[in-house]
Image (cartoon, grey):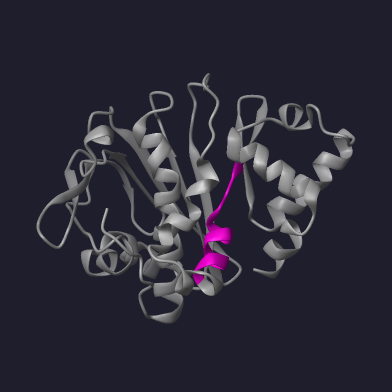
Amino acid sequence: MEEAFRALADPSRRKLLDRLREKDGQTLAELCEGLPMTRYGVMKHLRLLEEAHLVVTRREGREKLHFLNSVPIQLIHDRWISKFAKPWVSAMGALKSALEESMPSNLKHVYEVYIKSTPENVWQAITNPEFTRQYFYGTTLQAELKPGSRYTYNNADGGVALSGEILEVQPNRKLVMTFNATHNPESKADRASRVTWEIRPYSGSVLVILTHDDFDGETATYKSVQPGWNPVLSGLKTLLETGAPLEIGTKV
């Protein structure tokens, strides 16, 4: 969290985060447009934001795209703000409030979180219903972990919150599934998008990368999941590192 605080202290870096909040997945050239600093200066700020895990990058062809990773901000919120706000999830809603009318077809959300645990424990937390109930809005994952099978995340009352199809399974490494938010009438009407969990050992800890993509433009699902994933990943980290669940708030 110290790296995040230092990165957020600079107004130029906050400006870059604001630009990614308005339009995620920008190139360096796009981020430089209209800024009163050199290309090198922008690159230096972006490097510091990456080191603080507030920005993540992905290569697409010859382009390097930059994405806002708001999980560290969520962790700050969980630690110092959540006890004063109910429902606390709403405090993160402004992170994705303004999107351009003309959106690219390769829209995606990318998140990274470092967890002091093992790949085996992270995998179990992602796939075991007794674990998901403690950090995934109280829902339990019901799934046969093999490609082509269906899955659901069920609320305590038996209602289906999320559903989809398992696409790829690499135990302790990778899980890919389609995603349909059946709890929301608007999102339910969207074509299923795609969620990819990646688990990578990293210096005695685990790097968890979650990518949500394959949207049909600025859909109801695209607009709703960004603030929704933040408490899930924050809750996953808290549960594995402390053994105690983080209060997520209302069900999905």
Q: Identify which residue is drawn at 12% across, 52% down.
A: 159
From the viewer's side, name the closer residue of 62 and 241.
241
Q: Is residue 197 left or right of residue 51?
A: left
Q: Identify which residue is drawn at 42% across, 63% down.
A: 88
Is residue 159 found inside the magenta-colored segment of the image? Answer: no
Q: In this view, does 52 lie to the left or right of 171?
A: right
Q: Where is residue 162 in the image (x, y as percent from the top left)?
A: 23, 46
The image quadrant where one finds the N terminus is: bottom right
Q: Where is residue 214 in the image (x, y as percent from the top left)?
A: 40, 30
Whether residue 96 can be seen here: yes
Q: Where is residue 103 in the image (x, y as percent from the top left)?
A: 52, 22
Magenta region: 67-78
Q: Is the magenta stretch mostly helix, strand or loop?
A: helix
Is residue 72 found inside the magenta-colored segment of the image? Answer: yes
Whether residue 119 can be seen here: no
Q: Quadrant of residue 139?
A: bottom left
Seen in the picture, residue 32 relative to 138 is either above or below; the reply is: above
From the viewer's side, name the closer residue of 2 and 249.
249
Q: Identify which residue is drawn at 46% across, 74% down.
A: 83
